[in-house]
Amino acid sequence: MARLFIFGIGGTGVRVIKSLTMLLASGVKMNATEVIPIIVDPHQSNQDLKRTLNLLEDYQAVRDKRDPGHEGFFQTNISTLQRLTGSQSIGSTFSFKLKNVQNEQFKDYINFGSLNKKNKSLVSLLFSEKNLATEMDIGFVGNPNIGSVVLNQFKDSGEFVNFASNFSQNDRIFIISSIFGGTGAAGFPTILKNIRNAQPPLPNHEWIRNAKVGAVTLLPYFGVAPDPASKIDKATFISKSKAALAYYETNVSGNNSVNALYYLGDDRTKDYPNDPGEHGQRNDAHFMEVAAALSVVDFMNMPDAALGSENGRAVQPIYKEFGIKRDEELVSFTQLGDETQAQIKTPLTQYWYFYLYLRDKLSQTLGKQPWTNRKKPAVNKAFTHGSFYQNHLSPFNEQFGTWLKELRQNKRAFAPFSLSEKTSSGLFDTVRGIEPQRHWSPFARDNYVLYDEELNRAERNVGSLPVEQKFMRIFYKATNALVNRKFDF
């Protein structure tokens, strides 16, 4: 298996990585030994960026404590570039910080004031007064012409050099971006060009030039509320997308730069608050971001023979779209294609039941069920009040619940589960559109009684392990047994 370097560009890139992290936490299988996300977003105060960085750090902390020798939740390793390389010259987070963009206008970045009269005239032809006055620390607010200039610094950064130094011949690259904004539309072709045109003295430049490169580009899938004072106008999204696609026709798909390119978009949209970035820019999770995350999984599961590259170009580029079985506003598992259902239905349902038990039942069970204290180390209050549970697993699960709620309330909505505050009865009726198996005997057990039985059975087959490993393995085995027992997946 190969390692995967993911470049997540702009707000859409950030949110797609969040959805991918949720899928991997649930145990969705991807043919990768390790995933290294590199987020490129100048808007460091972006609330979506902060949420995703916290999520990734919690994922990493939980993954560090689980049993690496068994399949289960958090199975895929996610690392920062610094953790992979050991270099202290780059940042310790998953985010690449652009230089000279904080509290600076674009005209200052290009030293407009020091240009001579002729060069100022040339720059004024290329960039409007509004372009030149753009505050870059909130992103490029729908101006890819600005982004393409600023993002060129990435090729000279310590992050790019360290990425190149640790790139192996069999590793793969994936780029996530939107096409209707500024940062993503500019960042995708810029980073792709630097990969395909890699030259000495960049380490491993031949491997990078001929790497297996996948990308997903998202066409408009949400809108923004009208605001005459804002720099963002959703009426321009389609025209910007057309302009970007025309450029990509020559410089991305037209010259075979990408081995596998995924196009996604939706005409059922919801208007978000019109926030260019000054107020933190926090968007709800969206079904298109889940679909984009699945494109990463699909790319990594393709055989090497399908993704050949020579002389910095893909030999036989592959182009894909994503569809659902019925054009409905509220999507559940049953509207997804059969292959997609096979990939995500079981793991997401298992993690859903894991999430529900920890949310609704665990505190009442400690010390009362054999699985919690039959063998040492015990799963007790010391465990649930400890750092692993309180600082990492519980916050991750809280974000998982928020992610599901946001997907449910967006448009187009994705609602695989019935979200409610009470699950003491009807626990197995919470998977929308799928009828659970019914056992009509006087001795039938259901809901949390059955759940505890499976936890007790799983615990009996687990040997001596650290409490974190024991906890994660018991719940994976129990939820797997429950799903197999109650559903015909």
Image (tube, rainbow, N blue to C red):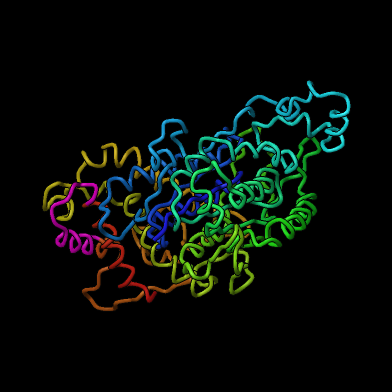
Q: Is residue 74 visible?
A: yes
Asked where in the image residue 456 lies, by quadrant, the reply is: bottom left
Residue closer to the observer: 341 or 168: 168
Q: Position of residue 465 (x, y in %)?
A: 17, 50
Q: Position of residue 419 (x, y in %)?
A: 46, 57
Asked where in the image residue 151 lies, by quadrant, the reply is: top right
Q: Residue furthest top?
A: 114
Q: Tell me the chief SS of the magenta region.
A: helix
Q: How many marks?
A: 0
Q: Position of residue 368 (x, y in %)?
A: 17, 51
Direction from residue 305 to residue 288 in the image, left or right: right
Name the image quarter holding the N terminus. bottom left
Q: Is residue 267 visible?
A: no
User: Residue at 67% across / 46% down in the picture?
Assistant: 272
Residue closer to the observer: 40 or 356: 40
User: Residue at 79% across / 21% down in the picture?
Assistant: 113
Q: Which residues are magenta?
A: 452-469
Name the image quarter holding the C terminus. bottom left
User: Residue at 64% across / 50% down in the picture?
Assistant: 193
Direction from residue 408 to residue 349 in the image, left or right: left
Asked where in the image residue 225 lies, by quadrant, the reply is: top right
